[in-house]
């Protein structure tokens, strides 16, 4: 949990964080991110790292697990990502920081049933077409593409052209068996996803996305996947449970306040997996869920520190009366983290929805 990459929505991915509307950095002609916004593609061989981000101005502590945004203007849209004319921007540094923990947490137990379904889909000359929704910097593709056999073409969706550039540049080049992996990018908002957008898809993926969607948006996603007849692998949705060792009397209260914060403005937060499972099942899909917790110890101290700041900050934003005790709590937790004495388990859930194939495949 924490800002994501996504692991979000056309809403920029790998989130778990607060995100505010972005500035217009990188919009100049000739910049690959500007080209992505205009044409929907970025050359994966371009080595440019994109525009230099501005300094972190504040933590927007909204949605997911709240992470510092790189740009959060004073007139930031209170509706959150996907609800403004400006694309949200998530800090690539946060997304890079969380990527190893995300990869370690994702549920490998869901891969075998996914592989079986994919093997039964009609073959395509250009290989498996994968749509990665809210791709962020592309961590889902870097994790999954090398675990699947056969040629793959990844269509990376995000609302932020800045992150789309990172995702294209960092995309994997080969599958598990050495087959070619290609990518294209599409800038857009998941709230406007239609079945036509997924025409020809063999798989839909997302990471750290479901909990920053509304029930209506999850329903739209399920309907689009069902119409395309393709499975959906949706990973790292917050489960609303956190374990910290050693325990502290404020742990439960801050967890509860954070969960309430996640549900603000109609977002699903920790209710996302249940809502998504029901939405896919209503379309006849077989749904499997599996735990995918972050397990953070001394080796993940930098991630734990940033997660703690966002987690506590969101709780205080939800319940201002917690400000003073939560401030002391955060100081204690950060000191324990720096000393290598803090262990954190942040619970997530992965969901695999096996929609009924179209075209007679079983």
Image: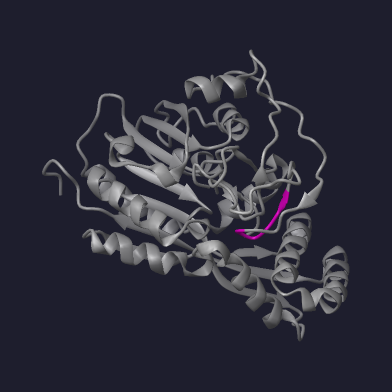
What residue lies at 53% left-to-right and 54% top-to-bottom? 208
Q: Is residue 44 visible?
A: no
Tell me if 235 is positioned left or right of 200 in this view. Answer: right
- Asked whether residue 190 is drawn in magenta, I would say no
* Residue 288, picture quadrant: bottom left
Q: Position of residue 122 (x, y in %)?
A: 19, 36
Q: Position of residue 240 (x, y in %)?
A: 56, 72
Q: Position of residue 191 (x, y in %)?
A: 43, 46
How many numbered callouts?
0
The region drawn magenta spans 63-68
Residue at the far left: name it.
Answer: 360
Q: Is residue 285 visible?
A: yes
What residue lies at 31% left-to-right and 29% top-to-bottom? 127
Closer to the camera, 74 or 313? 74
Q: In this figure, which colouring scheme has been used for the structure?
A: one colour
Closer to the camera, 271 or 356? 271
What residue lies at 67% left-to-right and 82% top-to-bottom? 252
Residue at the far top: name it.
Answer: 30
Looking at the image, residue 24 lies above or below residue 138: above
* Residue 285, picture quadrant: bottom left
The N terminus, quarter of image: bottom right
Tell me if 334 is positioned left or right of 64 in this view. Answer: right
Looking at the image, residue 302 lies above or below residue 339: above
Q: Position of residue 184 (x, y in %)?
A: 45, 26
Magenta stretch, overall SS: loop
Closer to the camera, 107 or 253? 253
Residue at the far front: name it.
Answer: 75
Tell me if 14 is positioned left or right of 301 in this view. Answer: left
- Asked whether residue 65 is drawn in magenta, I would say yes
């Amino acid at each position: 949990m924490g800002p994501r990459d996504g692991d979000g929505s056309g809403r920029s991915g790998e989130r778990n964080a607060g995100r505010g509307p972005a500035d217009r950095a990188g919009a100049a002609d000739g910049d690959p991110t500007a080209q992505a916004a205009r044409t929907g593609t970025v050359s994966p061989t371009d080595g440019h790292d994109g525009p230099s981000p501005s300094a972190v101005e504040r933590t927007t502590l909204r949605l997911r697990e709240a992470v510092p945004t790189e740009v959060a203007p004073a007139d930031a849209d209170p509706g959150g990502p996907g609800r403004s004319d400006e694309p949200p921007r998530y800090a690539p540094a946060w997304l890079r920081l969380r990527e190893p923990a995300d990869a370690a947490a994702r549920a490998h137990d869901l891969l075998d049933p996914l592989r079986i379904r994919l093997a039964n889909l009609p073959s395509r000359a250009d290989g498996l077409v994968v749509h990665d929704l809210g791709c962020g910097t592309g961590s889902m593709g870097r994790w999954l593409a090398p675990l699947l056999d056969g040629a793959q073409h990844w269509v990376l969706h995000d609302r932020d052209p800045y992150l789309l550039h990172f995702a294209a540049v960092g995309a994997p080049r080969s599958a598990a068996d050495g087959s070619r992996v290609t990518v294209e990018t599409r800038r857009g908002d998941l709230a406007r996803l239609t079945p036509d957008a997924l025409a020809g898809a063999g798989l839909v993926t997302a990471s750290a996305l479901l909990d920053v969607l509304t029930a209506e948006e999850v329903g739209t996603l399920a309907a689009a996947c069902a119409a395309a007849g393709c499975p959906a692998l949706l990973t790292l949705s917050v489960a609303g449970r956190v374990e910290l060792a050693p325990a502290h009397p404020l742990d439960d209260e801050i967890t509860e306040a954070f969960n309430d914060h996640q549900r603000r403005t109609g977002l699903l937060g920790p209710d996302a997996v249940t809502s998504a499972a029901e939405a896919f099942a209503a379309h006849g899909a077989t749904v499997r869920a599996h735990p995918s917790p972050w397990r953070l110890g001394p080796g993940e101290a930098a991630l734990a520190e940033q997660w703690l700041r966002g987690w506590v900050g969101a709780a205080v934003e939800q319940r201002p009366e917690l400000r003073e005790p939560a401030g002391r709590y955060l100081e204690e937790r950060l000191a324990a983290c720096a000393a290598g004495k803090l262990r954190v388990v942040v619970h997530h859930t992965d969901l695999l929805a096996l929609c009924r194939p179209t075209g007679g495949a079983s």
